[in-house]
Amino acid sequence: MKTTDFTRRDFVKGLSAASLGALASGYPLQSFAEEPATKLASTADTVIVLWMGGGMAATETFDPKRYTPFEKGLNPNKVLSTFPSIPTSVDGVRFSEGLEKVARVMDRGTLIRSYTAGDLGFILHSRHQFHWHTGYAPPQSVACPHIGSMIARTLGPRNAAVPAFINIGQRFDVGEGEEIKAFTSAGFLGSEFGPFNVTFPDSAKDVVTPPGGMSPGRFENRDKFYRRLADASPIGQLGSGFQKNSLIRSLDNAHRLLGSSAAKAFDLTQEKPETIAKYVPGGWDFSKRLGTDLSREGTYEKANIQRFGLGCLLARRLAEVGARYIEVTTEYIPFLNWDTHERGHEKLTNMKQAIDGAIAQLVLDLEERGMLERTLIVVASEFSRDMMQEGKPDKPVVDQVPLPDKIESMTQYGMHRHFTDAGCVLLFGGGMKRGHVHGVTADERPCKTLKDRVIIEDLHASIYRALGIPPNLSYEIEKRPFYVTRDGLGKPIQNLFAKTI
């Protein structure tokens, strides 16, 4: 590995990924509430969230409606789906064309078609992503922890050498990176429970390998110097005393990982090419660098398709060695990927190539290894999309995309507006039902929720409950309780679970 390929600064940033998230918040932790008196029975040990950042259109993916093929002069009000539907392995359940491989494993999953995003006023992706990942609508008076951090704090690591919360695929120096940082953090819980960020899964091993040219002794000296610097810094400069101590503990965790055999899980070059090809369309050449292709004009979309597949493969390897919460994102960048303000049909064709084989193979691999029953996979997005409707039928908001009288080109063909009344969440494993559909939506516009509405508090409560965490668990910050679900009111959706819990 050339030093120019992965610099010392890159390495320090990688180690700091699990260390710096909450320090910027400035909110000192006063004290923690006691752990629950009784441990609830669990149906899962691990959660893998596959995040479709940017607004995944339900009618183009897992809740298809009437298909209208493109032709010039189309009335946009007639367009509900721009792909025909296909059968799945469950009788009567259909997906959108392009998701054939996920369709074949639907008999292992539960599909929610009635997820309803929060009413947050003017619709902004980063606000709704904050709401989804923390359970709280911004702004808040305290730094809200990410759901992965809440899980890491409450349950701890499954393997002491492996970060409990690992985040794969999102850059923070593009688009709305600063806004995404606001919720990709442990918040007031402390740095040690923050995410270990792996931006490019193809080079994940570099994050846990000291860069070339740095001897072990030199590395240890730098670590000792950094610890002295942190210890000597005034209170407030690096956060409260609690936050400083949490930072030191996160450094200890990072060093434990570096010296562990579990670090090999980050090395995707150990996988056979035929295995990689099941996750990544066309396979992957490790002499290339995703970071380069994702930054070069004209190569982003293809590289992003490959990145998500590699991220899912990495998630499987990390689950095998004991990661507790893993999130793999298709990456949210305004106007790219699922953010289909134009060229909606074309962009979704690309996104389906990215997720179809990767999601299906992750399910099959975990099943083959006997891990699916105790691993909960969650495929989700902040909200859905529609050709005509912005917001909800009963709570419309200002259109953010001009509405043409007629569709004259493929640029206008696809779902462009933010639709928050009905979206899809796909669940596999973790004690959930198999071959089950929850929720009903209208077949004609507006394709709103008609039955069994799901809100974020109850979705989070279901995820927490699968892990044995009560939805009214709280931690104390500024002498007030902060609950894992808003005000502790989330209720697990019993109809999702294979057995009553």
Image (cartoon, rainbow, N blue to C red):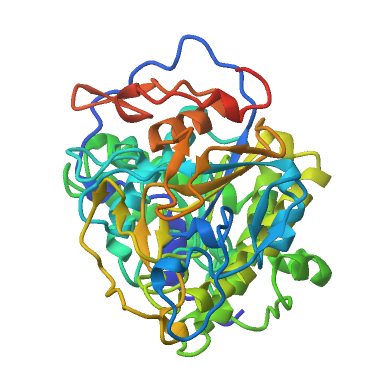
Residues 388 and 57: in front is 388
Quadrant location of the C terminus? top right
501 horizontally vs 135: left or right: right
Q: Is residue 255 visible?
A: yes
x%, y% of residue 430?
65, 34
140 horizontally vs 252: left or right: left
Q: Quadrant of residue 212?
A: bottom right
Residue furthest out toward the top:
37
| Residue name at image x 36 percent, y 48 percent | 185
Seen in the picture, residue 327 relative to 469 is either above or below; the reply is below
x%, y% of residue 480?
21, 22
Q: Quadrant of residue 216?
A: bottom right
x%, y% of residue 117?
36, 45
| Residue name at image x 44 percent, y 87 percent | 409
Q: Quadrant of residue 419?
A: bottom left
Seen in the picture, residue 365 relative to 345 is either above or below; the reply is above
Quadrant location of the N terminus? bottom right
Seen in the picture, residue 456 relative to 70 is either above or below; the reply is above
| Residue name at image x 47 percent, y 35 percent | 459
x%, y% of residue 58?
51, 56
Residues 268 and 375: in front is 375
